[in-house]
Image (tube, grey):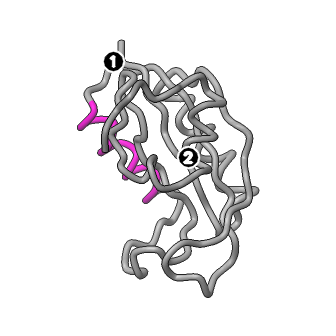
Amino acid sequence: MNTCIIGIGSNIDAEKNIPQAIRILTHDVHVLQTSTMLKTKPIGFTDQHDFTNGAVKIETKWSLKKLNKYLKKVEDQLGRDRSQIKFGPRTIDLDIMVWNDEIVDQDYYTRDFLRQSAAELGFHAKNQEH
């Protein structure tokens, strides 16, 4: 069984899309815990609404690659528009941040809210270099 922390964020109907994404996840993986959702300022492209960000801790038998493909399908199901600029508005953003106690998303090191959400879910980096 693999344990994973998935970063979750939205700035388009976040109060609807984040709970919906978590509901979808519960059908296919074992959701263990959800962090507090935090309001954050946009990064990169700043002329847009603030984001709501947090994380979920899950268990799955799937591989990292299969889980990543699944998360992209969930994003598509919730109307994620991939034609937008890289840091533009989005209905939902689901990114694998920690996989079996290893940081796999380099954004972990540069975004306080990711570290805070991961810590709330019991993850503490063990002298991992980036």
Residue 18 place in picture, x, y as percent = 65, 50
Q: Residue at x 65, y 68 (%)?
A: 11
Residue 1 place in picture, x, y as percent = 36, 12
In the rendered view, does 103 fall on the left or right side of 113?
A: left
Reply above or below: 31 against 113: above
Camera-side residue of 73 and 42: 42
Q: Secondary structure at mark 2?
A: helix
Q: Residue 61 has which mark?
A: 1
Residue 74 shown in magenta = yes
Reply above or below: 115 against 110: above
Q: Residues within 10 Å of mark 2 (few under 14, many from 20)?
A: many
Q: Residue 75 has which mark?
A: none
Q: Secondary structure at mark 1?
A: loop
Residue bounds of the magenta highlight: 64-76
Q: Residue at x 72, y 47 (%)?
A: 37
Residue 6 place in picture, x, y as percent = 48, 39
Camera-side residue of 26 and 65: 65
In the rendered view, does 106 fall on the left or right side of 40?
A: left
Magenta stretch, overall SS? helix
Which mark's residue is nearer the viewer, 2 or 1? 2
Q: Which residue is mark 2?
A: 114
Residue 66 shown in magenta = yes
Kindly report the distance in space between the C-alpha atoms of the residues bearing marks 2 and 1: 24 Å
Camera-side residue of 117 and 127: 127
Residue 58 place in picture, x, y as percent = 50, 25
In the image, farthest residue toward the bottom: 47
In the rendered view, does 88 fall on the left or right side of 46?
A: left
| Residue type, numbered disc 2 | Leu
| Residue type, numbered disc 1 | Lys
**Figure label count:** 2
Q: Residue at x 40, y 41 (%)?
A: 96
